[in-house]
Image (tube, coloured by chain):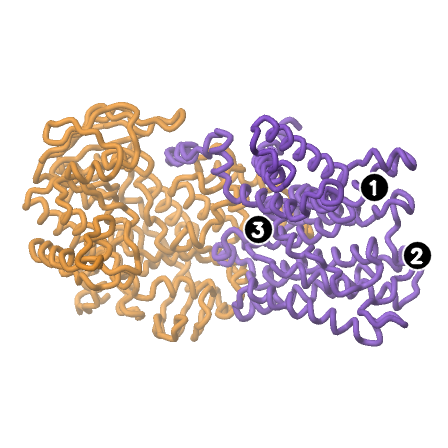
Amino acid sequence: MRNLLSKFGQAAKLPTLSFALAFSITGLLIAFSDPKVLAKIGSPLEFIKSGLATIRNSYLALFQGSIFDINLARGHNFFQGFYPLSETIVISTPLILTGLSVALAFKSGLFNIGAQGQFIFGAIGASYVGFHFQLPIVIHIIAAALAGTVLAAIWGGIVGLLKARTGAHEVILTIMMNYIAGYFIFWILKTKTFLRPGRFDPMSPEVGLNARLPRLAGDNLRIHAGIFIALAAALFVWWLLKKTTIGFRFRAVGANAQAAKTAGISVPIVITSTMAICGGLAGLGGAVHILGSERALSPDVAGSFGFDAITVALLGRAQPLGTVFAALLFGALRAGGRTMQANTGTPLDIVLVTQALIVLFIAAPNFVRFVFRLKKLSSSASLTSKGWNG
Amino acid sequence: MSLELRGITKTFGLFTANDSIDLKVEAGKIHAILGENGAGKSTLMNIVYGLLKADSGEIFVDGKLQNISEPSDALSAGIGMVHQHFMLIPVFTVAENIVLGHEKIGKFGVLDIAAAREAIIKVSKDFGFSVDPDAIVETLPVGIQQKVEIIRALIYEAKVLILDEPTAVLTPQETDELLKTMQELKRKGTAIIFITHKLREVRAVADEITIIRRGKVIAAVSPSTSEGELASMMVGREVDLAPDRQEHEIGEPILVANNLSVRNVSGTEVVKKINFELRAGEVLAVAGVQGNGQSELARAIVNLEDHVEGSLLLDGHEIRGLSIYDSLHAGIAYIPESRELDGLVSSFSIAENLILDLHDQAPYASGINLSAKVVSEQAEKHVLEFDIRLQSVSDAVSTLSGGNKQKVVIARELSRPVKVLIASQPTRGLDVGSIEFVHERILGERDAGRGVLLFSTELDEVLALADRIAVMYRGEIIEIVDSNVSKEELGLLMAGVVNEKAVS
């Protein structure tokens, strides 16, 4: 157990430090972008004082908007104070699933830029089954989620098949497939099947009551059971990669496709099935988003869940648990950013800068090591073991 | 000019790579440094060349103490180095590579290449090289690329030339040529430090031999010392250079190729209608100069090649066109030419690499569940059986030495039921101790009644192991001869000269 903890600590060290560094720099940005602070530039003491106050207020608002808001708790019941946390989790839930989609592809040596398109098809499949059919409770949810997942798995699988058969690069394929999916959803929302009766703007009917994921904390908080589906999916990806022969093949192809091929592993099958599973995960994200919080299909249902997923997977080092944490962090920044803008006037864009900085530092580990005076990954350690000879 | 090292010590953590090493190299002498992989030869040379900093010790050039902390210091002290992996930019021309880092600017700020071109032509003439200064490096054969490195050192007036395992990447012909070049350099007064673990080459050209083992100088001996003695000093125990090959009954044909042809991606026929019969209990060596179709033939047998025609019968059953998986499980063990690229997943653990081919079979897997416990238990067994030296089976395989990596590949391939072993350059880049082990294993398979198809460019290896030798030249088997053929005859055959007497 202690061993496991120290291993986890090692893995989390760099992201945590990057996080701290990013927030320090963002703090400066917040202070310098506030005209009230800049007005006091004449007297340094006042300038620093008001700068620190602005930073504190902004980060307080960020916390209030993402975790707990005492003002909300006072007015209603105590639980209502957790409304921000509920919002954080609502945003994080689809992000965990799309993040896992990208992370799993990374592990197989594939760069899945297509989570966005796969998410859209997941949302289309789930909403169609959700509003078009009347099924018993539980079964309706399963059927709708499954429809979205399978549709997106096919959508992702096409990319894998094309790559395996023709050698076309998955990055180009997925980017193009994103465009197709993005315009496909516009078109389908204009068809009779999908357009909500009586509406002229592109919006589908709401999914049936039986198809909605149950809310976890009453009607005032939007948090829904989708978070459990997302966590189960993370567990599934971990199990698949670590405990099964399928995951073994995925990882082998990801690490050295040529050696995997020589040992008899079919690289085309691995590529196709990886992309299908990745598509399914992102599609499940779309389905959960529809069934849990959106309830109806709209053209911008996917937001930037599919693109943020790439950042989330990178930040989570393509590990399932890491991806969950990274998605929660991004969800919190998103939810908190709105409150920050509303309460303190700090622009929402600052949050995007923070996100970018975190990823930048993760991508440049030696810079973070330099800032915190940590030892570089010692090259002597590997040399030592090379020295022994049989 | 002379180079002297006194008390060079270098440690990495707890491991002492160099332990107070003394060495003296004189002008006009070839000084061989002999040692196994990981003995500390490369560390020592990287210190001399300024790539690593010694913990203690001194370097003298012509009796003067030198402070060498980076390669430019070494260069200005007259020390040049040709690395095992060439430091050339493949898409640049020879001349561009040579001026790299010493660029001179001519009129209008344009790079002045002409001077370098002239210098290359002059050095080439002086030493009898034929190197075109305008050739793109990546289009040149490896042997010529190496000459470009040597020319670079000579142009910058290296008086001490370090050659780090220069023959590891060369064909026998290129090796002979390099040895001639070294003697030419020596005659012109260059001091050469020749790093190697190949005994024959050392005895052929060296004036002095220093043997290093586990970071220490073990002995300084003369080149008249026998190969056996040199090997035992290197390894630290008695080494059997000529493996014991018992005569025994050869069985029925087990792998039969009929008019087997292989085309590469560009459609060129690289293996041309080859016929052979490999019998149970024999080693059939496929000898030849690198690039005569041997690699493709080896790959075709496990169906790694896409465009293959003809027939390939394993134990009477057609195996051409099977999947790689089915080929391997039909009873073929395959030791690929490049263990790094084709043999191992270097970021995977040793235990995982040992089951790369068997991961979906019992006892490792039931259904899609992979049992990590069984995998590591079985790995421990293999480690004992194949004497793989490691700290833990869960370490990445990349932490192992070349010899131990190859043992992992061999252990894995022989853990399936095997009828035929295809070994492609199985000892390339290995040290004496590991070569001995690989040879014993190959003969072990032969004695157990398996057929062994050995692809090798090393004449000594072919002659030591083979029962029969098929010589490949330009995609064809031009002769199949008995193993009592002389080295000279075999060399001629490999060069494509068919001699009536050599035919059996």
Distance in Å between CA atoms under marks 2 and 3: 39 Å
Q: At label 3, which amino acid type do we have? A: Arg
Badge 1 and badge 3 in a common chain? yes
Chain that appears purple: A
Left or right of B194 in this view: B294: right
Residue located 21% across and 53% down the image: B98
Q: Position of residue A276 (x, y in %)?
A: 66, 61
Q: Position of residue A131 (x, y in %)?
A: 88, 65
Host chain of mark 3: A
Disc tally is 3
Q: Is tag 1's residue or tag 3's residue first in the polypeptide sequence?
A: 1
**Which residue carries the number 2 mark?**
A137
Q: At label 1, which amino acid type do we have? A: Tyr
Could you tell me which quadrant the C terminus of chain A lies in? top left
> Circle 3 — which element?
helix
**Which residue carries the number 1 mark?**
A83
